[in-house]
Amino acid sequence: MSVAGKPKARKEQILKAAERIFAQKGFHESTVAEIAKEARVSEGTIYEYFSTKEGLLFTIPEAFIAKAREQDLFHLQLIRGAANRLRAIVYLYLHTWQENPNYAVINLLILKSNLNFRQTEGYRLIREGFRDITRIIQEGIASGEFRADIDPYVVRSVLMGAVDHATTNWLLSGRDHQLVDLVDPILDLVMTGLISDLPPAPGARPRWDHWPSRPARPAPPAPPAPPKTETD
């Protein structure tokens, strides 16, 4: 390894150690000394890279998302149709949590309640990912693939709320199943109210045919016939 590359590798080594310790013990119960021991560096070395323990915590999602986001955007460019792209996003989220449970604990169980985190670059990157989801839903409305009367922000909240809830339950209940097995159950539920009843416009991108169009509402039952009388 070149001399220039050593600081970067050392920083990544510290971040991975901090991720493990924070996930195992929680933020407040963890110490810089424990992280230094896990990373096999001195406490002083950690403070050369991070001024505070909280600053170290906040850097974990920034470094993680910066790597994952570029790859995710590349894959989304290869997928046609708003419904298919939403499915890809849900899959990528659940697969990421499943393969990186320590990071999932930090993101969903530690940082969610930290108001200071909202002022960081990591939080900005998370919000940018949410805006990508909103844009995809808006594109689906504009193309006629999705209903015109839906609120993109509500749909995004429902979709990502289901993803976060499923992952949190998985983290707290023993991780005894594959998170990615929940991709289609989550999407089936959301898409029931999202897919347009109207036929696709000529030349429009095809919908993902896993979801049928929303079933038509059943007609209300006819009122009962009046009772017959002797004069009928």
Image (spheres, rainbow, N blue to C red):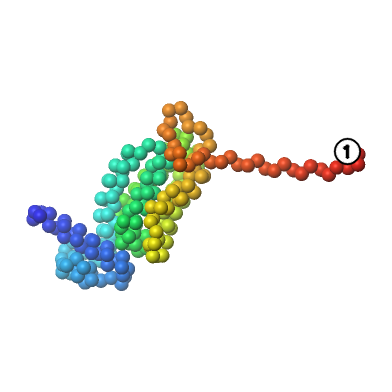
On the rendered image, what quadrant is the N terminus found in?
bottom left
The single residue placed furthest to the left in the displayed view is: 3
* Few, some or many residues within 10 Å of mark 1 (<14, 14–19, 20+): few
Looking at the rendering, which quadrant does residue 39 occupy? bottom left
Q: Which residue is mark 1?
A: 232
Looking at the rendering, which quadrant does residue 73 occupy? top left
Q: Is residue 39 left or right of residue 126?
A: left
On the rendered image, what quadrant is the C terminus found in?
top right
| Amino acid type, residue under disc 1 in the picture | Asp
Residue 130 in view, yes or no: no
Residue 215 in view, yes or no: yes
Q: Secondary structure at mark 1?
A: loop
The single residue placed furthest to the right in the displayed view is: 231
Looking at the rendering, which quadrant does residue 51 occupy? bottom left
- The x and y percentages for residue 93 are 36, 51
What residue is shown at x 37% (from left), y 37% (from top)?
Answer: 80
Between 148 and 209, the one lying in front of the other is 209
